[in-house]
Amino acid sequence: MKGLEWGVFYNKFGVGKYDPKQLEARIVDLMEDEDVTKNSGVYEYLLDNDERHLSIRAFTPKMARMAYERQKGICQMCNRYFDIDGMQADHITPWSKGSKTALENCKMLCADCNRRKSNL
Ligand SMILES: [Zn+2]
């Protein structure tokens, strides 16, 4: 655990509230998760649950293309047809709910729907 301020960390978590062993296990899990591209964000993530700290791996262009073909260019929210350039890849089940950045969890939304969704 190089460079980690354990004191600050535990202060924020509240002493005695969390089992250090459990916490350690979660840290290891997150660090070993291939979708987490920013390991230094793990501690911040555990503090505020904001997955932006982790820079979750994005879908590759190939995954996006395959998902696009699978749904035949139809946006999964508004059911309209779009060119692939007008669409964005999105997780079907959010990563925070235990899903992975993988083709089977990839859906394509049009830019408008994707924007609207993230503003909810
Ligand atoms: Zn749409």
Image (spheres, rainbow, N blue to C red):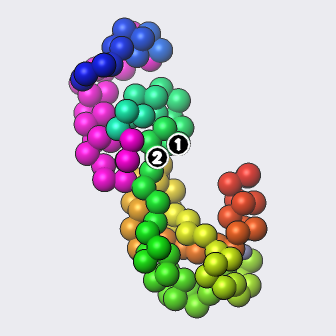
Query: In 3D space, how far apart are the residues under numbered discs 2 and 1 (Cα atoms)?
Result: 5 Å
Residue labelled 1 has its Cβ within 8 Å of some atom of ligand 1:
no
Image quarter (top left, top right, bottom left or bottom right) of the N terminus: top left
Counting from the top left corner in percent of width and height, residue 120 is at 73, 52
Which residue is painted at 26% across and 28% down in the image?
Answer: 24
Q: Does the magenta segment cover residue 112?
A: no
Q: Residues within 10 Å of mark 1 (few under 14, many from 20)?
A: few
From where the camera sits, is residue 6 visible?
Answer: yes
Q: Name the residue under label 1.
A: 52
Tag 2 secondary structure: loop
In the rendered image, residue 6, in percent from the top left (x then y), is placed at 33, 14
Q: Is residue 104 above or below residue 9?
A: below
Front residue of 12 and 18 = 12
Labels 2 & 1 near each other (Cβ < 8 A): yes
Which quarter of the frame holds ligand 1? Answer: bottom right
Residue drawn at x 58%, y 91% as measured from the top left? 72
* Three-letter code for the amino acid on which mark 1 is drawn: Arg
Pinpoint residue 73: horizontal percent, then vertical percent.
62, 87
Camera-side residue of 26 and 112: 112
The span shown in magenta is 13-38
Question: 35 left or right of 69?
Answer: left
Residue 37 highlighted magenta (yes or no): yes
Q: Which mark is residue 115?
A: none
Q: Which amino acid does label 2 sit on?
A: Ser
Q: Name the residue under label 2.
A: 55
Q: Position of residue 10 (x, y in %)?
A: 39, 13
